[in-house]
Amino acid sequence: MATNPDRASYFPAIEKKHGQPMSYWFDQMDQISDRKYPEQIAFLRENHGFSQAHANALVLYSRGSTSAHRVHTVDEYLAPFDETKQQTVRAIFTAITTKYPRMELVIAWNQPMLKLDGQYIFGVSVHTNHILIAPWGDGVIDEFRPRLAGYKVNKKTIQVPVDWKPDAKLLRDMAAAGIAAASG
């Protein structure tokens, strides 16, 4: 199964091992859909004896991730998304790499990331209703919190609209702080 990225490829084994059809397991997931990923995994493992692999396949499938397919290029990452999201992501990276042309755009953790001299500096992930930007470096988000007043700020990411017109100065300043943190 490890070579098949389709999460549904685990379903026959789940049905066989746990004696219930997938419709039963989807109902179970519907009942705990408001819980966070780790809580859903724990529910399946502790209450139903699921292995980590089976729990992960069911939870991620139920959350809309039907494949563990890994992307290798930014174009491949962006392909499933609409033109607006693609343009926003490209504009974010362009805003940073215009000032820092030595940065390398890579895929890490199945997400597009900017690296400089082997250090991660900035990442982006696309979601249904927003885009998350992730400046790397301890304290970078806290340092910029006053300038992030209009955004939803998480522990390590900042949520921006899918049609965001990137604030190039903010992005470049966060990248500079990430570079400073990386060189430490």
Image: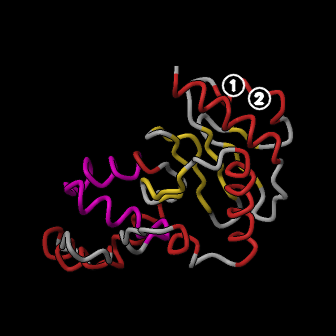
| 25 is higher (above) or lower (below) than 158 | below
| Farthest-out residue, top | 184
Residue 46 picture location, percent across and down: 25, 47
The residue at the point 47 percent across, 39 percent down is: 117
| Quadrant in the rendering for residue 145 | top right
Q: Which residue is mark 2?
A: 145
Residue 81 picture location, percent across and down: 63, 75
Query: Is residue 19 highlighted in magenta?
Result: no
Residue 65 relative to residue 21: left or right: right
- Cα distance in 3D space between marks 2 and 1: 5 Å
Circle 2: residue type: Arg
Query: Is residue 43 highlighted in magenta?
Result: yes
Q: Which residue is mark 1?
A: 142
Label 1: few (<14), some or many (≥20) within 10 Å?
few
Q: Marks 1 and 2: in contact by CB < 8 Å? A: yes
| Farthest-out residue, front | 102
Q: Nearer the viewer, residue 96 or 134?
A: 96
Label 2 SS: helix
The residue at the point 62 percent across, 63 percent down is: 127
Residue 30 relative to residue 142: left or right: left
The residue at the point 44 percent across, 60 percent down is: 110
| Farthest-out residue, left | 17
Circle 1: residue type: Asp
Q: Nearer the viewer, residue 98 or 77?
A: 98
Magenta segment: 39-65
Q: How many marks?
A: 2
| 24 is higher (above) or lower (below) than 35 | below
